[in-house]
Image: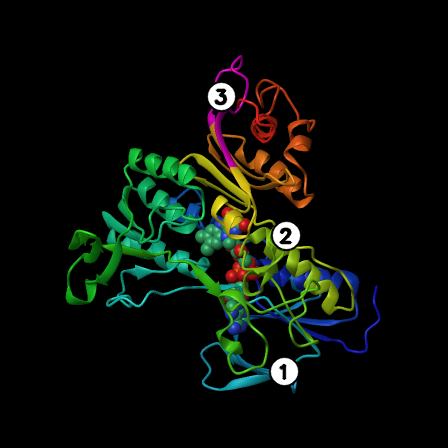
Amino acid sequence: MYNNLYNNLVVIGGNASGLAAASQARRINPDLNITVLESGKYISYSTCGLPYFISGYVKRAEDLLVYPKDFFEQKRNIKILMGHRVVGMDPSKKELLVSVGHAQENKIIEYDKLIISSGGTNIIPDIPGIDSSNVFQFRNVSDAENLKDYIDSNNPKKAVVIGGGAIGMLLAEAFNQIGVKTTVVERKERIYNEFEYEISTILARKAEIDGIDILTKTSITSINANSGQNTATIEDASGKKDLECVLVMLATGISANTGFLTDTSIELGINGAIKVDNKLQSSHMNIYASGDCATIKNIVTGKQDYIPTANNAVKTGRIAGENAAGGNKVFNGSVGTVVDKVLDLEIASTGIGSKEAVSLGYDAIKLIDGFSSHAGSVPGAKKIAIIIIVDTTSRRLLGAQMIGGEGVGKRIDVFATAITNEMTVDDIYMLDLSYAPAISTVWDPVNKICGKAVLALDGKNV
Ligand SMILES: Cc1cc2nc3c(=O)[nH]c(=O)nc-3n(C[C@H](O)[C@H](O)[C@H](O)COP(=O)(O)OP(=O)(O)OC[C@H]3O[C@@H](n4cnc5c(N)ncnc54)[C@H](O)[C@@H]3O)c2cc1C
């Protein structure tokens, strides 16, 4: 427990990171007054589970709520103020300007220490018709409820998803599952563009097999619902054409939700994220930031990065909460580990890709191979493809990506651990990984791909 000369801790944002912060502050300091300000009408929800509500796999939006407000108020003595949106602040006076519900007037809330965990915000492309009532965003429970209501009332048969990243593909899958014919429009060369070409190509092929159309190197130039047409105009190298669609889903990426800090001197970095040090402290000593609104140190590159994942949000929240309550904990950073299950394929990545390795000056090699997820003696094994990126000088693993039918999540975490601990492919090749025929092969695919790298580095036949 820490002793403080202050007692008023305010947290902005009532989801993964903000509640992790508030809860940790309470754990280590029972005397603080802790207040969480949340602009929306829900707190503590599983954002990651929202697509399953659209597909109907999760039946009710309430099922995505993790802990109720009462839990925080009664068990953790944390005051939760919903419908409280921070619209401005004056760090020199330690004051927040807060808009409450639909009230016309704002009120001032004071703090001694502040944690900003306001998450990310969707990037809205500047396209004519983007404000049409058939265009949806998808970040929180209210967005999911709006989309579900629209689908239930209008029974759309055709949808366009703008953006072929993780969120776009998860929603395309959800629409496909409920019988909405979906086209994903991606302006870059391929979907899942942050992944290596081979991995995103496997996913794109699976999408086409499942009946989802993928248009790459294609942009949406207008959405035409406001002029009474159920179309969106798209443009590729061959010119413009109209695509029929009743529903348009925006999945064009996120930036940090820090617009309300514009008039303050709080320093912002990559993607508008609040610059924090390894103790999650911002450029102001009484203000901490965590989760999708804050920068994060990339362990592989050593640089400040923007890696908006739930796993990072809860961990940075915990450290910010501890330090704001008087602690002195350090957050070492992230290797950018992500995993998704989309179209019955697990797809995952950790560390850096081949292009980034080259741009950082590494003399790197990339190895790719396909494996069986478990032994052939037990029926039902699935194919998995693995790519690793290795620094030829140090023989260290720099990055790994995988796609396949099962066991991808388990294995990407081994790679993440290895990268964090700067292991060489020689070490990983001989790592004692578990084996049972229904789970793996005697040489786990993680061992095998690293064995292949060892041969390549030693100049032997691969
Ligand atoms: C559809 C979807 C699926 C995802 N799936 C995964 C996944 O499988 N794995 C994974 O790791 N990550 C996933 N993510 C990302 C993950 O959800 C986020 O990284 C995580 O929610 C970030 O937590 P956070 O608390 O920082 O921000 P948020 O969850 O965005 O919470 C921020 C909160 O702050 C509130 N707020 C914002 N501004 C203000 C203000 N001015 N005043 C008061 N309150 C404010 C918001 O209403 C919100 O409740 C997914 C995201 C989406 C959208």
Q: Quadrant of the N terminus?
A: bottom right
Is disc 1 placed on a helix, strand or loop? loop
User: Which amino acid, mark 2?
Assistant: Ile
Give the mark count: 3
- The residues tagged by marks 2 and 1 sit, at their Cα atoms, a distance apart of 31 Å
Q: Which mark is residue 381?
A: 3
Whether pointer 3 and pointer 1 mark residues with C-beta atoms closer than 8 Å, the reply is no
* Circle nearer the viewer, 2 or 3: 2
Of residue 341 and residue 74, the one placed in the foreground of this image is: 341
- The residues tagged by marks 2 and 3 sit, at their Cα atoms, a distance apart of 34 Å
User: Which amino acid, mark 3?
Assistant: Ala
Please indicate whether residue 122 sits to the left or right of residue 399 in the image. left
Please say if 404 is above or below 138: above
Circle 3 Cα neighbour tier, 10 Å, few/some/many (<14 / 14–19 / ≥20): many
Q: Is mark 1 within 8 Å of ligand 1?
A: no
Please indicate whether residue 27 sits to the left or right of residue 147 in the image. right
User: Which amino acid, mark 1?
Assistant: Pro
Circle 2 Cα neighbour tier, 10 Å, few/some/many (<14 / 14–19 / ≥20): some
Q: Which mark is residue 91?
A: 1
Please indicate whether residue 183 sits to the left or right of residue 70 in the image. left
Span highlighted in magenta in the image: 366-383
Residue at (43% x, 61% y) in the render? 142
x and y, in percent, of residue 188 in the image: 34, 52
* Circle nearer the viewer, 2 or 1: 2
Q: Is mark 3 within 8 Å of ligand 1?
A: no
Question: Residue 209's quadrant in the figure?
Answer: top left
Please say if 440 is above or below 208: above
x and y, in percent, of residue 31 in the image: 79, 70
According to the picture, the residue beneath numbered tag 2 turns out to be 299
